[in-house]
Amino acid sequence: MVKKVVSATEVAKLANVSQSTVSRVFTPGASVSEKTRKKVLEAAEVLNYHPNALARSLITKKTNIIGLAMKDIQNPFYHEVLGIFSKKLREKGYFVLFVYTENEEIQQDEIHHFLEYNVEAIIVTDALLSSKLVEQLRKNDIPVILFNRYEKSLLCNSVSCDNIYAAREIAAYVYKKGYTDIVYITGKINTSTNRDRQKGFTEYLKEKGIDVKIIEGDYTYERAFHVTKQFIEDGHKPEVIFGANDITALGALDALKEKNVRIPKETAVIGFDDIRMSSWPNYALSTWIQPVQEMVDETINILMSSKQRKEPQTIKVKGHFIHRNTTV
Amino acid sequence: MVKKVVSATEVAKLANVSQSTVSRVFTPGASVSEKTRKKVLEAAEVLNYHPNALARSLITKKTNIIGLAMKDIQNPFYHEVLGIFSKKLREKGYFVLFVYTENEEIQQDEIHHFLEYNVEAIIVTDALLSSKLVEQLRKNDIPVILFNRYEKSLLCNSVSCDNIYAAREIAAYVYKKGYTDIVYITGKINTSTNRDRQKGFTEYLKEKGIDVKIIEGDYTYERAFHVTKQFIEDGHKPEVIFGANDITALGALDALKEKNVRIPKETAVIGFDDIRMSSWPNYALSTWIQPVQEMVDETINILMSSKQRKEPQTIKVKGHFIHRNTTV
DNA sequence: CTGAAAGCGCTTACAG
DNA sequence: CTGAAAGCGCTTACAG
């Protein structure tokens, strides 16, 4: 079964023009007379012709493909991110080559594939990137943008929430309530998001003379549920739990409920992200809203302008706290 | 800023061989002596060369790109699907060109783009496809696979759960419990999944002389929550509610909880999909497990073999019911 | 095992 | 406005 691709040459033959003319008809801005344009379009219609973007990109050096690499497909936050990216990039005429990686670190392999397909930029959400790989990408002159991640040691663009600021704000809120028995459930410990949220939260409270209890989570509901339950069973009943992300907070919340802890009276719960389900009535989780739309817009801006720049750009957005039913 | 792409020719120059030889080194199975291979690989390393997959595909007619179109990005079920597809296709050497469409119907436009990028197949999850478009795709000889959808009128491959069978099984379960006050909350009414689930469920019970109350949902949590709440407020208290998918059932469940209806004692709740959160302790939703892995495998099988066939293939998988805490 | 050459489907100066 | 020609980076018979 050979695929019969109709080429511009065949259309040209049918329309009785040169192949160059056919090409011009399909190149926005090229000058063709209305008459020949019509003739060509008719022939194209008959033959069911559509230009070959790959052949085109060979010459124009523009593939209009953006590589998007994600790891934690389990986190609803990233689904929202993916949807928004896909939509907004489409509007700009770009397509998304999607790679879901299960490995801790984006593999050489996967980056190579992106390069082979000549992606114009790579957006990495939650996967890790070695500085060696970043270096290699720089050499190939393809911009990399870390989304929702920030790594000072990595010489590449990044768009993220100002996690330290946000976590300090949350800490201030908690402090104002007069709480002293405070728990922070971590995310994956080697992520920049967790590092900064933990830092901002604990440091602020430390300054006020309060020690935060740290429980190790991993950004999954299941683990948060488990560790919180264990914690309660060990005889603790903190006044407030701050989860490193919403899914963590929800796990903690459900564990507290199962233990019949009254929320927010006995224990308040705070998350981070504002995923869609956090606003579900059954949860109504108080959380920090990450302005995803804005973050995506910023990312696309960087992407569109990065050919003119040489130095990587770092964008931090703020977001804000939203009070729902899990805080008093 | 011109992107400096290193071509095989430059590697050839450095390695002192012909460009053909460089090509062979990067073509699995081509015969090159160990000595020259090493020479070439070294030169490639130095120049940071990687073959251009686009140029290659121009000749081989293989792009290794699969188009994946999704609509309902809000449904966690499809996130899981996306993750699995992406992973399994990678294992087979394919990449996913992802399109998220907000339109009810996959647009001509989007399909055109897939064609321009020479995708080798198109997987459509929950978006609608006009028969005209399907026809056009057939003409271009590119296989289309409807995932989790089945449309008799559409001449294309499809992999889905046997929704009629599954819904009848659920109906049988409900019937055996002796329920007579039974509610079905629909999904989007124009989808094949909803149509078949509704059909199987209501027809089975009709055969037993039981009329099912139908409430119109749209496959979102929010709507299911709203309509269920309204329903209870109107003075109803059904013995069981079957939601067209999990997210619908969860919405209903939360509405019932808010109305202090005891679950499953007063009202049992059943979903469909088995998304991850359905197994969360707070929900523990009884539901129909769609064997997603199997469905994806079947899809990929069709995809790999469809060049040898001419007639579209229809696969139906079964799945099974899982009893958790929302049924007695 | 290796090289020279043709060709994949396009774009884009260059003439006219 | 249009055509002939070169060339993008590759693969693949064809010779040797």
Image (cartoon, coloured by chain):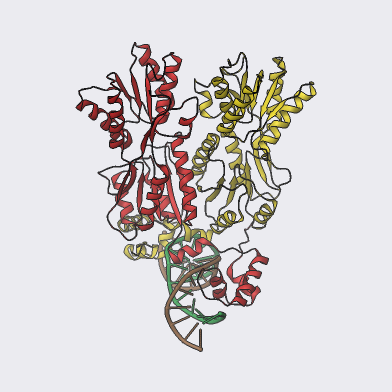
Chain colours: A red, B yellow, C brown, D green
Give the left or right position of residue A212, taking residue B246 as reference.
Answer: left
The image quadrant where one finds the C terminus of chain B is top right
Give the left or right position of residue B8, taking residue B86 as reference.
Answer: left
* A168 or A202, nearer to the observer: A168
Where is residue B52? Give x, y as percent: 43, 58
Residue at image location 67% in from the left, 50% down from the top:
B130
- The answer to whether A244 is drawn above or below residue B5 in the figure is above
Where is residue B137? Give x, y as percent: 65, 54
Q: Splitting the image into 4 quarters, where does residue A258 fall?
A: top left
- The answer to whether B22 is drawn above or below residue A29 in the figure is above
* B155 or A298, nearer to the observer: A298
Number of on-image labels: 0
* A310 or A314, nearer to the observer: A314
Where is residue A77? Give x, y as percent: 44, 37
Q: Splitting the image into 4 quarters, where does residue A190 fall?
A: top left
- The answer to whether B213 is drawn above or below residue B95 in the figure is above
- The answer to whether B201 is drawn above or below residue A92 in the figure is above
Inspect this view and state whether residue B29 appears. Answer: no
Q: Farthest front residue?
A: B234
The image quadrant where one finds the N terminus of chain B is bottom left
Inspect this view and state whether residue B205 appears. Answer: yes
* B50 or A9, nearer to the observer: A9
Where is residue B177? Give x, y as percent: 69, 15
